[in-house]
Amino acid sequence: MKKVISLLICLLMCFSFSVTACAQTVSASTVQPYYEMTYEAKSELVINGTTATCKSTIKAYSDVTKIEAEQYLQKQGFLWIWTTYDGAEWTKTVYSNTLVMSNTKTGLSSGKYRLKTIFTLTDKNGKTEKITVYSDEKRV
């Protein structure tokens, strides 16, 4: 009986921890995560034949003074694990509150691809926020 009670207490404790999450509604009734320093972050992948065009955009609030972006064109591989495809990674840094970057990769092999973008924002007080955004998955 003591084991049963201990197990029940243990289960109750496991389910009693709460997780805080925030979201905000944006145009077209879509929901995106809530960020402190930005109001729009996109990662877009367009595939035309065997050429991928990778576009990342972020628009931050005016107190953001620096944005670093890392793009990774990823391909789904064995056991559905995503890895960077054939050295397709790029970086860009701007000292502004808006960043747009676009890169291309040619000669794609058949498979499923996505674009992963990691944005690191820094505000005028030195506070940073890291945001990871994925594109929709596309096939070649």
Image (cartoon, rainbow, N blue to C red):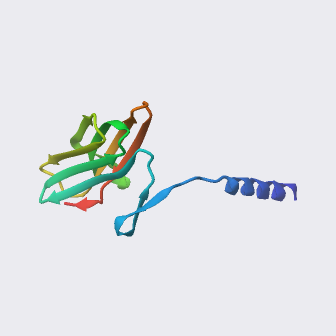
Q: Percent x, y for residue 29?
A: 39, 69
Whether 52 is drawn above or below 98: the answer is: below
Residue at x 33%, y 51% (from the top left corner): 41
Q: Residue furthest front?
A: 62
Horizontal side, residue 1 vs residue 71: left or right: right
Q: Nearer the viewer, residue 42 or 137?
A: 42
Instruction: Tell me how many marks there are.
Output: 0
Residue 54 in view (yes/no): yes
Q: Is residue 4 above or below residue 36?
A: below
Q: Residue placed at 77% from the left, 56% from the top?
A: 7
Please state, as top left, top right, bottom left or bottom right, where the N terminus lies in the image.
Answer: bottom right
69 displayed left or right of 46: right
Whole-percent x, y for residue 79 in the image: 37, 54
Spot the residue most to the right: 1
Q: Nearer the viewer, residue 15 or 37?
A: 37
Q: Position of residue 82 (x, y in %)?
A: 33, 50
Q: Is residue 107 left or right of residue 81?
A: left
Q: Position of residue 119 (x, y in %)?
A: 34, 42
Residue found at the far top of this picture: 126
Residue under the image location 30 percent in, 60 percent down:
136
Residue 103 location, quadrant: top left
Q: Nearer the viewer, residue 94 or 16?
A: 94
